[in-house]
Amino acid sequence: MEIYRLGISEIRDLLDKKEASVKDVVNAVYKRIDSVEDKIKAFVTLTKDKAIEMADAAQKMITSAGAGGCPPLLGIPIAIKDNMCTRGIRTTCSSKILYNFVPPYESTVTSRFIEQGYILIGKTNLDEFAMGSSTENSAFFTTKNPWDLKRIPGGSSGGSAAAVAADECIAALGSDTGGSIRQPAALCGVVGLKPTYGRVSRYGLVAFASSLDQIGPITKNIKDSAILMNIIFGHDPLDSTSAPLPVPDFTKVLGQEIKGLRLGVPKEYFIEGMDKEVEASVRDAIKKLESLGAVAVDVSLPHTEYAVATYYILATSEASSNLARYDGVKYGFRAEGKDLMDMYMNTRAQGFGAEVKRRIMLGTYALSSGYYEAYYKKAQQARTLIKRDFEEAFNTVDVIVTPTSPTAAFKLGEKTEDPLQMYLSDIFTISVNLAGVPGISIPCGFTLNNLPIGLQIIGKHFDEETILKVAYAYEQATEWHMRMPSL
Ligand code: GLN
């Protein structure tokens, strides 16, 4: 098997047994990038020079590693979504307003990777400021789905998901505010996990909607997801919303039985208008889990119908506040103007794309005096009800299983004219962010057109272990994750 096709733990083995050098691994990945990146366009920035430097350092660490062995990520090529700050390396959020922004500091997640001796392969494309479901809102270019180049990879972490699916990296990080890790993972046939809110430090993640944003892994398999979780999870004094809780070794739950485990199947997630092939695959996946000993139970999440509206009030409100800092003064793009106010206005008018402007306007409106009570406050109340739905359901079940996305990957351009249709792509993922619970998307089938379908497994707050256990049991009993796109 070609090196670039392997996962984290397999490359760890090769490196530790000295069957390959870090340079071999890095070269294999860039060779792959050279041959497919023109078609996929997953990366905003490739960091080859930096990677070669990091590879030399990693190789020295491997050679001198003592009896304790090497840290899991030493010498492993990883791609990072371009909304996480990397010191000295351009971090654009796929926005014109940050096209030349070089952060003077490192995000906590990538700092932890650096401590392990990882290799940064490049920064991946996204919808501008992570606002979107297709990467078509990137100010630079659209990433293509490796399974069908005429289709979108999902979003907003479309670059990361496509890079993993196309074997242009060994694993990647994404961020998820309303589905941006899970939905592209589903549409690209890879594994994507959104942790419980507070599990992973957001320090150095460019803020979109701070009460919803979480960073998480996008990987080729469940084990790799567990490995990355072990590293990025845990309290960080630099993020006051990060939870001061111990982090278990997530690889320990892999292989545990799921006999007697209760799977909630919410009726609100099997709806009119969803794709029949998606529904059939997810129902088959539930049967498969039952055959492994799990017990499927009907549950209800009655406030689901309010989730999309609630999200688009809260997320846009938070975004309107977070994005106020891009004024052309301290960093990023600056336009000319006849006075200060004119400069501000020109900078923001030219620097932001249409979707970002739409959201700033929506959010500013929802927060403005006279409307605050009717929109923002109401949405906060609805959020509480949605969160309670999950708490109620989790009184009787251990995990909840749903489709990740109502359809497989759609065609480029299919929804760009209709923002509401685009917003509905996240109908099954958004509630999970509003409730703050963790969710994972794993491959569970293919459409007749050979497009991947994702199964979403949702867990209780801070119970990522159970969703991993279920995901791993399913993965080991099926072969979906072994299919590869022909590129
Ligand atoms: N697609 C959703 C949005 O456009 C979610 C994005 C995300 O999770 N970052 O806001």
Image: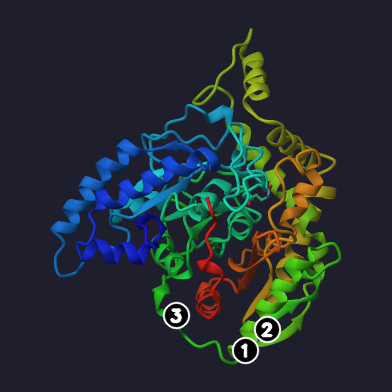
Which circle's residue, 3 or 2, is located before the other in the chain?
3
Give the class, few, some or many, for how many residues have Cα within 10 Å of label 2's Cα (few <14, many ≥20). some
Quadrant in which the N terminus appears: bottom left
- Count of marks, rendered view: 3
Q: Which mark, residue 367?
A: none
Residue at 50 percent across and 78 percent down: it is 476
Secondary structure at numbered mark 2: helix
Residue at 77% across, 39% down: 362
Question: In front: 226, or 28?
Answer: 28
Asked if labels 1 and 3 touch by Cβ distance under 8 angstroms, the answer is: no
Q: Mark 1 points at which residue?
A: 291
Q: Mark 3 points at which residue?
A: 253
* Left or right: where 339 falls relative to 85: right
Nearer mark to the viewer, of 3 and 1: 1
The numbered mark at residue 287 is 2
Q: What separation in Å lies between label 3 and label 2 (alpha carbons)?
A: 22 Å
Residue 400, given in percent of the width and then of the height, sits at 67, 76
Marks 2 & 1, CB-CB < 8 Å contact:
yes
Kindly report the distance in space between the C-alpha atoms of the residues bearing marks 3 and 1.
Answer: 20 Å
Which x, y percent locates residue 265? 73, 78
> Of the residues shown, which amino acid type is indicated by label 2?
Lys
